[in-house]
Amino acid sequence: MINNPQHPEYQYLDLLKDILKSGTIKDVHNTDAQIKSVFGRQIRFDLSKGFPLLTTKKVFWRGIVHELLWFLKGDSNIKYLVDNNVHIWDDWAYKNYKKAMEKGEVVELTQEDFIEKIKNDSDFAKKWGELGPVYGKQWRKWIASDGREIDQLAWVIPKLISHPDRKHYIVSAWNPEYVYEMAATPDKAMALPPCHTMYQFYVADGKLSLQLYQRSADMFLGVPFNIASYALLTHMIAHVTGYGVGDFVHTFGDVHIYSNHYDQANEQITREPLPFPSITLNPDIKNIDEFTFDDIILENYNPHPPIKGEITVVGGF
């Protein structure tokens, strides 16, 4: 873990510096991109002392909330996100359509026209908006060998209440049956194998903590999103189980910065963190499936301006 007695956001900034200074340069599969990469790092946030939505650049809060609600629905089709003007998964759906376009199997569409069709044509969205069994599907609708759908969160939540001292409260998104060449056929594979692969809950002193293991972490674009998303999930699960919030612990495997983000990362590390915001959840919500966007209120978020960076669409065989 990176220890720093200052603002907790310095953990993130120090890890950016670590990668820029000592990262190994690696190629990225199926792209022309390169990364600087380190392996095996950890940061930690005490959620009782502020909500860790990074302040050294403005982070897309609305997208974080809608994506998490999408996961919690067990959904794997981008239409919900598109309908809510969240486009963080558009590239992966369009990637599949583009492959079919290149084979002459479908009409040519720009990505903008493709997304407009997802929004307005339900039959088209059902076919081409589907990403396969990604995060939410595995969390809430894991297909068992006997054909059952296993809802991991529906198992975890009441157990956290009835048996808080147990050590097996793990939710996994890493299902080998749908990952790369382990899938029965290419069309059965996920559009993007889970980067944040599993998380574990822990109860102590009346507080709920969560630790995430992230096998692959895009430090500049993705990780600020992931920190806030899993911190929010911790708050939501604590809320419906009646616990206070403890720590969010973020454990990384391969944590990296893309070569087209070096300048942006160098700019971000010059900025001084500002006070973390806070969140308030609707006290009337008693069930994890009842949350809507309006039940989650972010307060006192006053970050530095955004720093833009292009996403690199990875994944696939």
Image (spheres, rainbow, N blue to C red):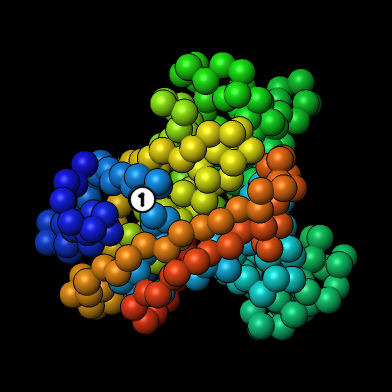
| Residue found at x 47% / y 34% | 208
- The amino acid on which the numbered mark 1 sits, given as a three-letter code, is Lys
Q: Nearer the viewer, residue 143 or 176?
A: 143
State which quadrant residue 228 falls in: bottom left
The residue labelled by disc 1 is 49
Question: Of all residues shown, which one is farthest toward the front?
Answer: 283
Q: Position of residue 139 (x, y in %)?
A: 63, 38
| Residue found at x 40% / y 46% | 48
Left or right: where 120 falls relative to 96:
right
Q: Position of residue 112 (x, y in %)?
A: 66, 83
Residue 287 visible somewhere in the drawing? yes
**Dot 1: element:** helix
| Residue found at x 23% / y 58% | 7
Image quarter of the N terminus: top left
Left or right: where 300 falls relative to 115:
left
Q: Nearer the viewer, residue 251 or 259?
A: 251
Q: Residues within 10 Å of mark 1 (few under 14, many from 20)?
A: some
Question: Of all residues shown, which one is farthest toward the left?
Answer: 21
Q: Nearer the viewer, residue 244 or 272?
A: 244
Q: Position of residue 282 (x, y in %)?
A: 66, 53
Left or right: where 273 falls relative to 289:
left
State which quadrant residue 80 falls in: bottom right
Q: Position of residue 131 (x, y in %)?
A: 66, 55
Q: Nearer the viewer, residue 205 or 264?
A: 205
Residue 129 visible somewhere in the drawing? no
- Number of numbered callouts drawn: 1
| Residue found at x 25% / y 44% | 41
